[in-house]
Amino acid sequence: MWLMTLLILLPMAGAMAAWLIPSNTARPWVLPLTASLHLGLVVAVCIVSPPPSPGGWIGLDAIGKLFLLELSVLFTACAFYAVNYLRYRQERKNRVLCMGMLVCLAAMSLSAVAHHLGLLWLAIETTTLCMAPQVYFNHNARSIEATWKYMLICSVGIALALLGIFFLAYSSLVAGLEPSLLLEQLRTYAPKLPTVWLNAAFCFMLVGYGAKMGLAPMHTWKPDAYGEAPGLVGALLAGGLANCGFLGLIRIYQICMASGDVQFYRAMLVGLGLFSIAVAAVFLVRQTDFKRMLAYSSVEHMGLFTLALGLGGKALYGAMLHLVGNGLAKGVLFLAAGNIHRAFASKNREVARGTFRRAPWSGALFLFGLFAMTGSPPFITFSSEYSFFSAAFSEGRPLVGTLLAVSLTVAFLGMSLTVLPVVFGDPPKNRERTRYGDTPLLVVPPLVLLLIVGVAGIWLPGPLYRLMNAAAALLEVVR
Amino acid sequence: MNSAADQLLVLVLLINFLVLGTRRTHVAIRAIAVQGVVLGLLPLLVHPFHGRILIITIFVLMAKGVFIPWLLLGAMKKVAIAEEVEPSLGYSGNIIAVALATMLAFVFAARLPLAAMHQGLLTVPASLATCLSGFIALASHRKAIKQVIGYLMLENGIFIFGLLLTEAMPLMVEAGALLDLIVGIFVMGIIINQISREFSSIDTGRMTALREVE
């Protein structure tokens, strides 16, 4: 219990320290320090498997462990990267950024261990709030527009999720049961809950957490926020906050899977998932801004998660693999994109051309990040995307499988058309050179993430494999 | 629940019309503050008196009745609003939309299976109608501050539904939800100030730099 509390208190203490340190150059070092301690703590918690708290509000299951591991690794990479990034951006005060990132880490850790739907909701809402100033880090007209859309759509979405939670609590009241919002309790209640209220709760939470994940058609804030935020904030949004939304969806999914009749939920998830993938694929083609391209790629992959939940079976294990693969690969791409953005002072593929000659390491990372993101072997995302196809065809849904294949191919081509000129093209001659150059702290963190995604695709350590299977088993239909 | 509570809920429904129909922003802010006060009093009426209920009441009154309106009025004062921006439905269109939404809410609520003690009460239709009105405000208004008011209205609708559950929802979650609401409005207030500085207007229709050009 105290170990799990420490997961939340440690980043909060880090945030306090960041607030107290007066120097703009020394402050960013709080980030990697706190992040490393947090990572160590996460590993310890995963090995010890502490029992749930007495009231059942806080507990750690396999899904939570997997989520924490992915989050902490990604955050640590971003934290080391941030030190050097913020050195480039000395003209801006970074107190709010450092504090916001650490509070966000605390809130994300809380969402991973929360087994009470109200508490989970609180944690997810807090992540939205404390990321808003980070999206606005550049303080210009474009970033204010992005922040406004982000705040409004995510707040409204999360409010709808709260209404869904109320519906769920009310459904147990209608069924004559003691109202509860504890996950385990609700799973035992599920078969007795009135279908109308459970369906309504599911729909509202799907729309609410879907807005947070960025599923189409609630995705409109995403390209703006990801495009205008600094690269490392984009990495955290795509690999951390979006996963928090997915975790919210997973929890209501677990309850619905225990209710007996699951047809409705599966159909909704498959429909919304495929729609998101298709919309993202359309917008990925002819996307000239490479940060916005990454945002649409995130919409696509959130769609894949949703689709996987809808398909069930083998796809569930794939979804757990993808949780790690997508999160870390997004980290690689966003951190590399941040470097390229600074090297050319532009994020347009017409201007930022030929990264290989200007910043070879960042260019290579961006290229291999593309392969990792689009599910090429040997990366872990290959196994996960393969499992989605095999689930679609083996569960007798060839139409879904075909649509998925077409969309993913279009998305891959679209992304390549943007990434390849950025990496290989001829650098523009008439533009002034920026003072950016690849440095170890800007290159090693994404490189480590890339290596993890690559190595895990070839050889998944035994404990991790068992953890993923245990997590997938929690998502199965309860009979 | 009792008839006093139902009468207050009718007041809440009327305020929805006022907020959506008024041209003047400070009237809308004050109206939403009154709605907040009414909502704050409701738990006292529908539940037997209890220390916990009193805490919720005080907290809600302070937040929705005083603090949030104060924040919004403050944000409005700093933003010199010279021109009025018509909502995309027009003010009369807004009122018609709210009327339709209220009707729909009543029809829909009548079909929902409710717990025996909640049958025939205004709580569920009032909650749905207020949520829908909030959505209409969010979609129709282009002025940032009125969009925030729409968001507040949506939250108020959710709060009304929460009245059915006050005994089931732990105090901590409720207080936390309210706190998040305050912080959210606070952040939005700051953003409104920045919008007016950057665009010299809080008409979100002018923010078009990030549209997808195809």
Image: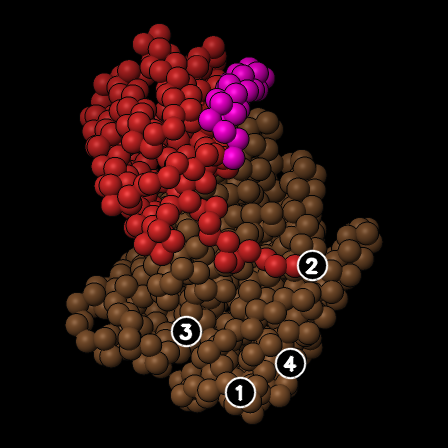
Going by the numbered disc 3, the residue's amino acid type is Cys
Residue A211 or residue A187, whichever sits in front: A211
Give SS at disc 4: helix
- Residue A78's tag is 3
Residue name at image x 26 percent, y 21 percent: B41
Most common SS among magenta residues: helix
Residue corresponding to mark 1? A430
Whether marks 2 and 3 lie on the same chain: yes
Q: Residues within 10 Å of mark 3 (few under 14, many from 20)?
A: many
Q: Which mark is residue A421?
A: 4
The answer to which of marks 2 and 1 sits earlier in the sequence is 2
Give the mark nearest the N terminus, 1 or 3: 3
Residue A91 occupies quadrant: bottom left
Colour of the chain lettered B? red
Give the chain letter for brown.
A
Which one is nearer the viewer's eye here, A323 or A158? A158
Q: Which residue is mark 2?
A: A282
Query: Label 2 vs label 3: CA separation?
Result: 30 Å
Give the image location of residue A185, x and y in percent: 46, 38
Residues at circles 4 and 1 in contact by the CB criterion of under 8 Å: no
Nearer the observer: mark 2 or 1; the answer is 1
- Are discs 1 and 3 both within one chain? yes
Question: What's the amino acid at mark 1?
Answer: Asn
Q: Kindly identify which chain the residue marked by label 1 belongs to.
A: A
Is residue A29 in view? yes
Residues in magenta, as a range: B88-114
Give the total of numbered labels: 4
Question: Is B112 a magenta residue?
Answer: yes
Q: Are marks 3 and 4 in contact (CB under 8 Å)?
A: no
